[in-house]
Image: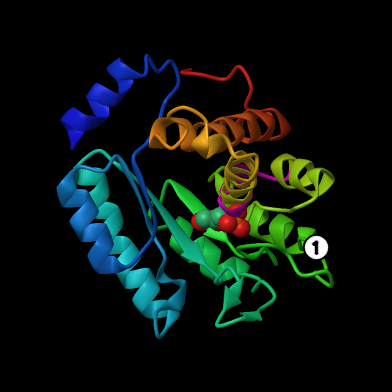
């Protein structure tokens, strides 16, 4: 896998740090990805039966990940979202639990501050900035991660960054622009023009739309022009 990551750097002529990262892994999935040569993992222990199990597994995985020189993100306070058609409001993490996970030596911390995965419901109250400030006060310089980046208003994103968020996960928004662009291509009948059915052509508009959206997000998040330091 390390060879694959190195090949990716060469083939894509990358000039910025890129990680091959496991998102929301169970304890077992993290072990597999550490072995497989991922360069970064996220252990989501927020669904474990108790916080003590989350803490114990976090300690163990931090050691295993760091022994292999890879970074590790852990989570406190589950990120809400749609489950079986029911959209839950985001859970807010306990600052003391965040501090305990931070002390394990994690490289980044995902802490629920009312954020949820997927499209936000109309009655979503917004990010809980008091909670973010309280977590920041207890975790110092540890980079915080904001999941559920899709659909959070730009001003709230900027405020979260100002308050210590250093990584923002966006997935659904990229899926949506991909789907829209692909739908447009198919509806315009381009699939039947020449070799328009070739997957390389069929998937190109969606791919380009995801690149454009990603560039937009990089600028919004204040990451433009930042490479190795
Ligand atoms: P969205 O799909 O809501 O953007 O969330 C992505 C995410 O947090 C992945 O971990």
Give the magenta part as a residue range. Answer: 163-174
Percent across and percent down for residue 192 are: 51, 37
Q: In the picture provided, is 119 more to the left or to the right than 66?
A: right
Percent across and percent down for residue 162 are: 74, 40
Q: Residue at the spot x=64%, y=35% of the render?
A: 213
Q: Quadrant of ligand 1?
A: bottom right
Q: Quadrant of residue 82?
A: bottom right
Q: Quadrant of residue 44?
A: bottom left
Q: Is residue 97 magenta?
A: no
Q: Residue at the spot x=19%, y=42% of the render?
A: 37
Residue 124 visible in image: yes
Q: In the picture provided, is 155 more to the left or to the right than 214?
A: right
- Given residues 64 and 81, the one toward you in this image is 81
Location of the N terminus (image quadrant): top left
- Given residues 137 and 68, the one toward you in this image is 68
Percent across and percent down for residue 133 are: 73, 55
* Residue indicated by mark 1: 126
Q: Provide the secondary structure element on which disc 1 rests.
A: loop
Q: Is residue 173 magenta?
A: yes
Position of 61 relative to 187 (above/below) = below
Residue 147 visible in image: no
Percent across and percent down for residue 107 are: 42, 46
Q: Residue furthest bottom?
A: 49
């Amino acid at each position: 896998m390390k060879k694959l990551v190195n090949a990716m750097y060469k083939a894509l002529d990358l000039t910025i740090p890129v990680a091959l990262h496991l998102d929301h892994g169970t304890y077992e999935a993290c072990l597999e990805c550490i072995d497989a040569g991922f360069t970064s993992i996220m252990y989501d222990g927020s669904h474990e039966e108790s916080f003590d199990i989350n803490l114990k597994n976090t300690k163990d995985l931090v050691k295993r990940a760091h022994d292999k020189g890879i970074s590790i993100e852990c989570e406190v306070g589950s990120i809400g979202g749609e489950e079986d058609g029911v959209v839950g409001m985001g859970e807010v993490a306990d600052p003391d639990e965040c501090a305990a996970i931070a002390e394990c030596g994690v490289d980044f911390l995902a802490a629920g501050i009312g954020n949820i995965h997927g499209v936000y419901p109309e009655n979503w109250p917004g990010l809980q900035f008091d909670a973010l400030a309280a977590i920041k006060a207890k975790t110092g310089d540890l980079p915080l991660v904001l999941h559920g980046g899709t659909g959070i208003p730009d001003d709230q994103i900027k405020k979260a960054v100002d308050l210590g968020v250093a990584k923002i996960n966006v997935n659904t928004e990229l899926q949506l622009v991909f789907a829209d662009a692909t739908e447009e291509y198919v509806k315009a009948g381009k699939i039947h023009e020449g070799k328009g059915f070739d997957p390389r052509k069929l998937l190109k508009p969606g791919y380009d739309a995801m690149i454009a959206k990603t560039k937009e997000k990089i600028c919004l998040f204040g990451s433009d022009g930042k490479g190795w330091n």
